[in-house]
Structures are given as structure tokens and as C-alpha cells.
Amino acid sequence: MCQLIVVTRISGTKFALNPDLIERCDANPDSIVTLVNGARYMVLESLDEIVDLVTEFRAEVLQRSYRTEVDAGQRTAANSERLPRPAKGSLAEAVTGAVNTTVVRNLIELPIRR
């Protein structure tokens, strides 16, 4: 699994960035990626393209995580009903009432303030 996104410097050379370290991206008019350590990179990709690259990266991480769980036999159609139910009044219970997914079922149990 690729843990980096590939972008292009203004000079045309490609390099890889860890999307977890991106603090912000600015477009004025060139796109500048600023990392959490203060390093700045001017890139050819537009702001929208950078956002798409990071979004695709995150989706790939979630997809691989889900596939790993299924492959390990932790979450299958046969045993999904045996998962513990969320605690009464928790955020997970409120959300699972509307959407029943593996990601939601794994939410940290947090009390709902009423």
C-alpha cells in the first residue's frame, strides 16, 4: 500500500508527500503545500487535485482496513449479528440507528448530551 501521495514540483520533478503531515494547501495562484514542520512545497497540481489525492489516499486506507478485517474473519455476514450492541444513549447507538456499518459500530462509546 502506498503511504504517500505523488505531486509535481514547478520544475517538473515528481516527489512523494506523506498526506498525514500536510497542514494546509494554498492556491494563490500556484499551489503551495505546507507541512506541519513548516516545510513548504510549490506544486503544479491544483488545490482541488491535492484534496482529491488526499481523499483517495484516505479512502484506500479505510478500504484496506475493512478488507483486512473481513479476510481475518472478524467481520463477516455470518458473525456480524454477534457484535456487541452499542451502549444505550451513546453516540454509536444514535448513529447505528440510521446507518449500520463496520466503521460506525467501531466508534468509541461516548455519552450523548441531551
Image: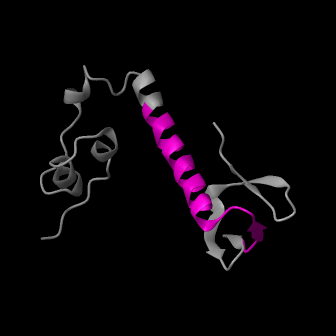
- The residue lying toward the viewer, choosing from 30 and 24, is 30
- The residue lying toward the viewer, choosing from 71 and 34, is 34
Q: Residue at x 64, y 75 (%)?
A: 26
Q: Residue at x 65, y 62 (%)?
A: 21
Q: Position of residue 70 (x, y in %)?
A: 40, 26
Q: Residue at x 56, y 60 (%)?
A: 51
- List the single residue furthest toward the bottom: 28
Q: Quadrant of the N terminus?
A: top right
* Direction from residue 11 to residue 5 in the image, left or right: left
Q: Position of residue 79 (x, y in %)?
A: 25, 23
- The residue lying toward the viewer, choosing from 8 and 79, is 8
Judge whether 65 appears above or below 104 on screen.
Answer: above
- 70 part of magenta stretch: no
Judge whether 24 appears above or below 94 on screen.
Answer: below
Q: How is colour applied across the structure in the image?
A: one colour
Counting the numbered discs, the total is 0
Q: Quadrant of the C terminus?
A: bottom left
Q: Which residues are magenta?
A: 37-66
Q: Position of residue 96 (x, y in %)?
A: 20, 47
Within the image, what quadrant is residue 23 found in?
bottom right
Q: Position of residue 2 (x, y in %)?
A: 66, 41
- 65 part of magenta stretch: yes
Within the image, what quadrant is residue 112 found in?
bottom left
Query: Is the magenta region chiefly helix, strand or loop?
Result: helix
* Direction from residue 108 to residue 67 in the image, left or right: right
* Direction from residue 86 to residue 64 in the image, left or right: right
- The residue lying toward the viewer, choosing from 47 and 64, is 47
Judge whether 30 appears above or below 56 on screen.
Answer: below
Q: Residue at x 77, y 70 (%)?
A: 42
